[in-house]
Image (spheres, rainbow, N blue to C red):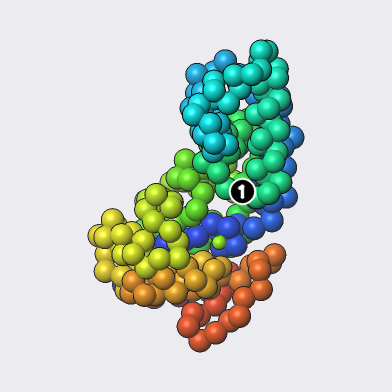
């Protein structure tokens, strides 16, 4: 039997994975490693662009200008670390912060100190869907680079091979129909041949407006949502009928 969709498009937090993982594991990891990371990576040329972004987010022209009054490196590192902690305390999603977090997470995942969470029904569903000839893609507010790190280092192993494409907010905001039209065009499918699964109703509304099929993901720890008639809900990927 031919599957009803050609592409299954997945959100991550609250859908493939626990929202709590980000707040209970990934953010605390950054705070724990921040000082040691800055010290060890301080002369790494890859850190420079992130530091400039952090300084720009703070209203300066560059990292050099932002720290011009500080004479030694340890003071510059302390100012950087204090700014990162301030942004994270306020849950402020700044570009420079995200860049530095990404670098620290890369270290954590690649060293095996951090292992990404996915719900147990996810790997078998990815296997079943791809075996049935469907493509599976990710659309998350986390950067494509972070998505690849995450799914490359899961409790269930490296799941990256299941995904044929990754999208992040460089494609567009997750609550706008236009973003879903862009994704449908990028995967070469009509909207109705794409099934989008997410825990956020506003995202599902936008996908539906773009003609996509939708499922509302109900997972432990998700914010309670009002289940309405607009989107069928599921508590496991095993409930997605594939023909
Ligand atoms: Mg989500």
Counting from the top left corner in percent of width and height, residue 137 is at 41, 56
Left or right position of 166 against 87 = left
* The quarter of the displayed image where residue 180 is located: bottom left
Counting from the top left corner in percent of width and height, residue 190 is at 26, 69
Which residue is under mark 1?
92
Query: Element under label 1?
Result: loop
Counting from the top left corner in percent of width and height, residue 105 is at 60, 37
* The quarter of the displayed image where residue 123 is located: bottom right
Relative height, residue 73 to residue 212 (above, below): above
Q: Is residue 204 visible?
A: yes
Q: Nearer the viewer, residue 116 or 184?
A: 184
What residue occupies the far top of the structure in this picture? Answer: 71
Residue at x 56%, y 74% (from the top left corner): 234
Left or right position of 233 against 4 = right
Counting from the top left corner in percent of width and height, residue 59 is at 54, 36
Question: Which quadrant of the figure contains the N terminus?
Answer: bottom left
Residue at x 43%, y 51% (from the top left corner): 168
Q: Nearer the viewer, residue 207 or 49?
A: 49
């Amino acid at each position: 039997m031919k599957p009803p969709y050609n592409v299954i498009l997945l959100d991550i937090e609250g859908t493939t994975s626990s929202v709590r993982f980000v707040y209970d594991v990934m953010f605390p990891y950054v705070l724990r490693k921040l000082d040691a990371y800055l010290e060890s990576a301080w002369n790494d040329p890859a850190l420079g662009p992130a530091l400039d972004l952090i300084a720009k987010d703070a209203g300066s022209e560059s990292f050099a200008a932002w720290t011009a009054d500080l004479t030694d490196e340890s003071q510059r590192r302390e100012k950087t670390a204090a700014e990162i902690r301030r942004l994270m305390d306020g849950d402020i999603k700044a570009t420079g912060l995200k860049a530095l977090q990404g670098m620290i997470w890369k270290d954590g995942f690649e060293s095996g100190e951090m292992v990404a969470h996915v719900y147990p029904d996810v790997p078998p569903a990815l296997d079943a869907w791809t075996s049935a000839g469907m493509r599976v893609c990710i659309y998350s507010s986390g950067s494509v680079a972070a998505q690849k790190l995450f799914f490359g280092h899961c409790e269930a192993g490296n799941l990256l091979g299941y995904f044929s494409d990754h999208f992040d907010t460089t494609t567009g905001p997750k609550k706008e129909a236009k973003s879903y039209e862009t994704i449908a065009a990028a995967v070469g499918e009509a909207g109705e041949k794409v099934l989008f699964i997410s825990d956020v109703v506003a995202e599902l509304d936008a996908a539906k407006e773009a003609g996509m099929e939708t499922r509302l993901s109900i997972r432990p720890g998700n914010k309670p949502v009002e289940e309405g008639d607009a989107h069928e809900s599921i508590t496991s990927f095993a409930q997605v009928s594939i023909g």
